Amino acid sequence: MIVNKISPEIIKNVSILSNSPNSTTPLLVEAENFSLTKQFLDKYGYHYKPYRFANCFCVYMDNQDLDIISCQNFVKYIHSNPIVMTTALKDYPIYLDNLTLGKFLGQNQTICFIDTGLYPHFDFLFPQNRVLKFIDFTKGGNIPYDDNGHGTFVAGVACGCGIYSLDKSGIAPKANIISLKALSNIGNSTSNVILDAMQWVYENHKVYNISVVCMSFGADVINENDPLSRGAEALWKRGIIVVAAAGNSGPNERTIKSPGNNPYIITVGALDTSNMQIADFSSRGPTIYGHKPDLIAPAVDITSCSNSNIPYTNMSGTSVATPIVAGICADIKSRWPKMTNNEIKSFLLKNCSPITGNKDIEGAGYLNFKNFENNNL
């Protein structure tokens, strides 16, 4: 066994890998050479799922397999398969301001939500059905549902049309929606299921014109080669705007969650608009790559779509801030279709106003909507 090629978390908990050939644990194997690793796994009959876009495999193994696989020179590192959680809080009073930007409402754009699913809420179906695709990576199936509510809420912040309200709506109420259910009814998952959803986006984004992916979840960062971070980066390099939550582990520093720790993507922290301060719960940087989050957005006292007969419900957290920014990205892309993801990120940061000036707390600051108005959005 080559210990320096195995996550310390695995070494610490190596007893969880049973020596019984009928009891295996899924771990993430990062490849030095993807093709040779695949050939090896095929040759010896391992149960695995490849993620070429992230240069890794989810491999089911026991202690003996861990010893054998770590010794292969075409294997770079064996990661644990960390738990992924939604980044929402549910104990705040709620109110939703209409933050829709001008006449560009996300039309001709598609936002993909990797989350707990999607309830068939009227906000997404009226005046026409904007849900282009639903896939359940947890149980299988393609009929929309949300047994937690988080995914419906997040989608509503970005794309709700406010049909039950006279003056409230999401940020991009004309954007199309794709919902990939990768988190369970209690709002968690394992990293390999999230990678399943990411890989689907990587392979199908052109088919459905996916311009933005919203990731209102987070996991503890494994190391600099964290598979979730690498997966998000692969989507970004594909030209997709990836927006992720910073996490709710503040106010301590170095608490940014994965994939929000990735330097390429847009990472969103939480602003409390009642006092124009950074919310205490908002995760802080720095990360091993530098300053994070990139910016902050409203995240306290927000209302959005419910997965029940009550049209709207209450939620706060960086999960709420993330779809606000995702919706704004869709609006910008609707206004300037030829803008790249890098240009849109730069545009966002240039239109932020700092509060403290500490980039490890707020990044560039909060989105200043007056600046957007000056850009005629």
Image: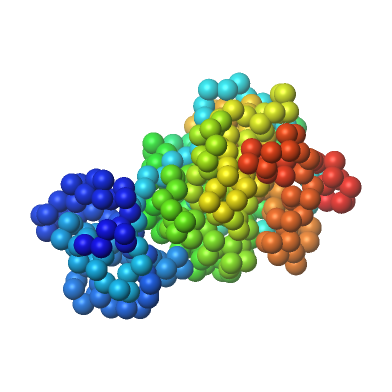
Q: Residue 23, position in %: x, y?
A: 15, 53
Taking the image as shown, residue 299 lies to the left or right of residue 4, namely right
Q: Residue 358, position in %: x, y?
A: 69, 38
Q: Name the residue: 59% across, 55% down.
A: 263
Q: Quadrant of the N terminus?
A: bottom left
Q: Name the residue: 26% across, 50% down.
A: 11
Residue 345, by quadrant, is bottom right
Q: Name the residue: 17% across, 56% down.
A: 63
Front in this rendered view, residue 37 or 376:
37
Q: Name the residue: 72% across, 44% down.
A: 364
Q: Residue 93, position in %: x, y?
A: 61, 21
Front in this rendered view, residue 237 or 91:
237
Q: Is residue 271 above or below residue 56?
A: above
- Exactly how many numbered labels are in the figure? 0
Q: Is residue 278 above or below residue 4?
A: above
Taking the image as shown, residue 166 lies to the left or right of residue 259, namely right
